[in-house]
Image (tube, rainbow, N blue to C red):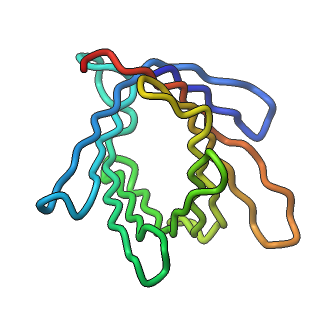
């Protein structure tokens, strides 16, 4: 995974990292682990997401937690065309939109955006370019 972080002052930080995805809860949910930077370097982000499909809303209940940074988010995710879009709120109370785009069998582009209120424009804060390294 290659990560780009866009800071408020216009500077950009770049890292490598790793993601691990798998079915859990007897195939009823997807769990992933996001690690930055790539091991064995000391982690600056180490979090997990649990996505549980709810046919009643035709979407996914999503819980993200990064205990290292005391960060968490609750979202609802749905397919939008060829993309997956997750909307919710983070630990600071900001609105979040996380998008999985350019999805193939071996890669995807993840775009993280936030805003203070519905009236504000979305600001891109993170991008992850992820590619499969093992089948």
Q: Which of 69 and 116 is in front in this view?
A: 116
Q: Residue at x 39, y 33 (%)?
A: 44
Question: Is 86 displayed left or right of 59 in the figure?
Answer: right
Q: Residue at x 28, y 53 (%)?
A: 30
Within the image, what quadrant is residue 39 found in? top left
Q: Nearer the viewer, residue 134 or 16?
A: 134
Please, is residue 89 above or below residue 110 in the view?
A: below
Q: How many labels does the image show?
A: 0
The quadrant of the image that shows the N terminus is top left
Question: Is 18 displayed left or right of 107 in the figure?
Answer: left
Residue 66 in percent (x, y) is at: 35, 51
Q: Nearer the viewer, residue 109 or 34?
A: 109
Please, is residue 47 above or below residue 54 in the view?
A: above
Q: Which residue is drawn at 56% across and 43% down?
A: 100
Residue 103 in percent (x, y) is at: 54, 34
Residue 122 in percent (x, y) is at: 79, 54
Within the image, what quadrant is residue 80 found in? bottom right
Q: Residue at x 66, y 66 (%)?
A: 95
Q: Which residue lies furthest to the bottom in this view?
A: 56
The quadrant of the image that shows the C terminus is top left
Residue 26 in percent (x, y) is at: 11, 60
Question: Is 14 displayed left or right of 57 in the figure?
Answer: right
Q: Which residue lies furthest to the left in this view?
A: 26
Please, is residue 68 above or below residue 131 in the view?
A: below
């Amino acid at each position: 995974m290659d990560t780009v972080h866009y800071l408020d002052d216009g500077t950009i930080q770049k890292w490598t990292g790793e993601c691990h995805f798998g079915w859990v809860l007897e195939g009823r949910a997807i769990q992933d682990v996001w690690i930055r930077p790539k091991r064995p370097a000391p982690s600056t982000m180490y979090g997990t997401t649990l996505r549980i499909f709810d046919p009643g809303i035709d979407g996914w209940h999503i819980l993200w937690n990064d205990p290292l940074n005391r960060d968490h988010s609750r979202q609802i995710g749905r397919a939008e065309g060829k993309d997956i879009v997750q909307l919710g709120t983070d630990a600071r109370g900001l609105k979040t939109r996380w998008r999985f785009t350019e999805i193939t069998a071996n890669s995807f582009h993840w775009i993280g955006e936030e805003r203070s209120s519905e009236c504000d424009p979305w600001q891109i804060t993170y991008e992850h370019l992820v590619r499969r390294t093992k089948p």
